[in-house]
Amino acid sequence: MGSHDVMGAPTLDAYSRDEWKAYFDAVAVGLVAKPHTTRRRARDMAKLCPYADVAAAGLAKVKAAIDAHVDMVGPKDRAKWH
């Protein structure tokens, strides 16, 4: 066992569907002010999510949140985030 190994540390598969949904909800709500970071983080975690339907729904929710944020900011900045 290496010095950084932790006995009983949960793997990504150990998280439930509801926990994955909550993660994508938090990303969509919490990082909208930084659309590039939001989109990147959601894509990275969607690749790791063991539930394809939850990942797809999460990415759609993040995209919708970014679009809503960009609509509030105005058309001038829209090209920068798409």
Image: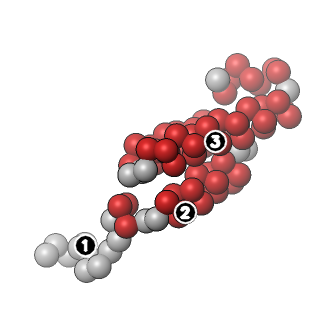
**Which residue does the image show at 25% across and 80% down from the upper left?**
7
Q: Earlier in the sequence, mark 1 or mark 3?
A: 1
Tell me if I can see residue 12 in this picture.
yes
User: 39 or 21: which is nearer to us?
Assistant: 21
Label 2, label 1: how far apart the Cα atoms are:
28 Å
Picture coordinates of residue 69 (x, y %)?
A: 78, 37
Residue identifier under label 2: 18
Determine whether, in the image, residue 44 is placed left or right of residue 22: left
Residue identifier under label 1: 4
Quadrant of res 71 = top right
Tell which residue pokes out farthest to the left in this image: 1
Bin the neighbour count of mark 1 within 10 Å (Cα to Cα): few under 14, some 14-19, many 20 and up. few
Q: Amino acid at mark 2?
A: Asp
> From the viewer's perspective, is residue 81 above or below residue 33?
above
Residue identifier under label 3: 62
Q: Earlier in the sequence, mark 2 or mark 3?
A: 2
**Which residue does the image show at 53% across and 64% down from the upper left?**
19
Q: Which mark is residue 37?
A: none
Q: Amino acid at mark 3?
A: Val
Picture coordinates of residue 27 (x, y %)?
A: 62, 51
Are the residues tagged 2 and 1 within 8 Å (C-beta)? no
User: 55 or 42: which is nearer to us?
Assistant: 55
**Which residue does the image show at 52% across and 40% down from the upper left?**
56
**Comparing labels 2 and 1, the label whose residue is closer to the camera:** 2
